[in-house]
Structures are given as C-alpha cells and as structure tokens.
Image: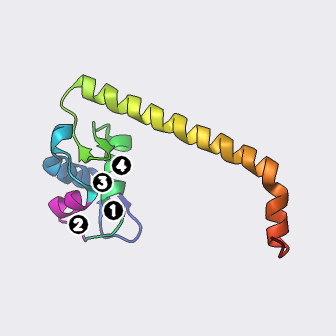
Amino acid sequence: MKEYPGSMIALDEDAVVRLMSVLPTGKTHAVTMAQLQRRMGLRPQRTAETARAIVKYAIERHHQLICTGARGVWAPTSVDEVHAYIDSLQSRMAGIQRRRDALTEALTIRAGVLADRANGGA
C-alpha cells in the first residue's frame, strides 16, 4: 500500500476497485476529473491530483484499461478504442519532443539574451 502525498487515500487495490466501479465506459460517456472525484467520494481538489494519481496507479500497477483525454476519463469499450488512445498518446509524445527540440535550439541561439537579463540588461 502506498499513500498518496497530501491525501488520506491509499494507492492500493481498494482504490482501484472504487475507481473502476464508478468509471464510465466509452469515450462518449467520459467524465471530467472533477466529476470522477465526486463519484469516488474524494475530497474536492482544484487539480484533482488524488484522482489523477489513482488513475495512473490503476493503469501502471494494476494493468487497467483506462483512457484520458480532452473529454475526460473513461474505460474503453473496444480494442480499436484502446489503439486510438495509444495513437493519440504517441502523437502527443511527438509534439512534446518537437517543442523540446525547438526550445533547446532557441536556448542555444539565445543563451546570451538570458545572460544579459540575469545581469540586469534588456
């Protein structure tokens, strides 16, 4: 059992069972993290960090099929739905990598600007 920091909720099988019992099935029935918090009876949090931690734990440690996205969080209803979600994760990773590469390049080009700012320059 692992307790989530700042929470009275333990990251354990009971938390996963509770999550899976209230998680809607199908992307069209997705709920927001705030809605998921309420369904699980969790203390309301602006960023829903406890609910997010339980979802992450359920996926990574208990091999639960859970999807998240702009519509919210849901249990997929088909293999195709899981594959579509995996594809979206891959696309997001590629976008993050492009931004990382662009920022690294910008830092190389503009490192002197930051040094000037740090020394009180423009």
Magenta residue span: 34-43
Mark earlier in primary sequence (3, 4): 3
Q: Are marks 3 and 2 in contact (CB under 8 Å)?
A: no
Disc 1 crowd rating (10 Å Cα; few below 14, some 14-19, many 20+) is: many
Residue with the mark numbered 3: 12
Residue 57: which disc? 4
Residue 10 against residue 61 in the figure, above or below: below
Residue displayed at 26% across by 28% down: 81
Mark-to-mark CA distance, 4 and 2: 16 Å
**Mark 3 crowdedness (10 Å alpha carbons): few <14, some 14-19, many ≥20:** some
First along the sequence among labels 3 and 2: 3
Dot 2 falls on a residue whose secondary structure is loop
As shown in the figure, which amino acid type bears the numbered disc 2? Leu
SS at mark 3 in the image? loop
Residue 15 counted in the magenta span? no
Task: Look at discs 3 and 1 and give the one toward the viewer.
Answer: 1
* Position of residue 2 measured from the top left corner of the image (x, y, whole percent): 38, 58
Task: Say whether residue 5 is left or right of residue 79.
Answer: right
Q: Which residue is mark 2?
A: 42
**Pointer 1: what residue?**
50
Q: Quick one: which residue is furthest to the top in this view? A: 80
* Marks 3 and 2, how far apart at CA: 15 Å
Q: Position of residue 97 (x, y in %)?
A: 59, 38
Which corner quadrant holds the N terminus?
A: bottom left
Q: Amino acid at mark 3?
A: Asp
- Mark 3 and mark 1 lie on one chain; the one further toward the N terminus is 3
For the residue carrying disc 4, how many other residues have a C-alpha within 10 Å: few (<14), some (14-19), or many (20+)?
some
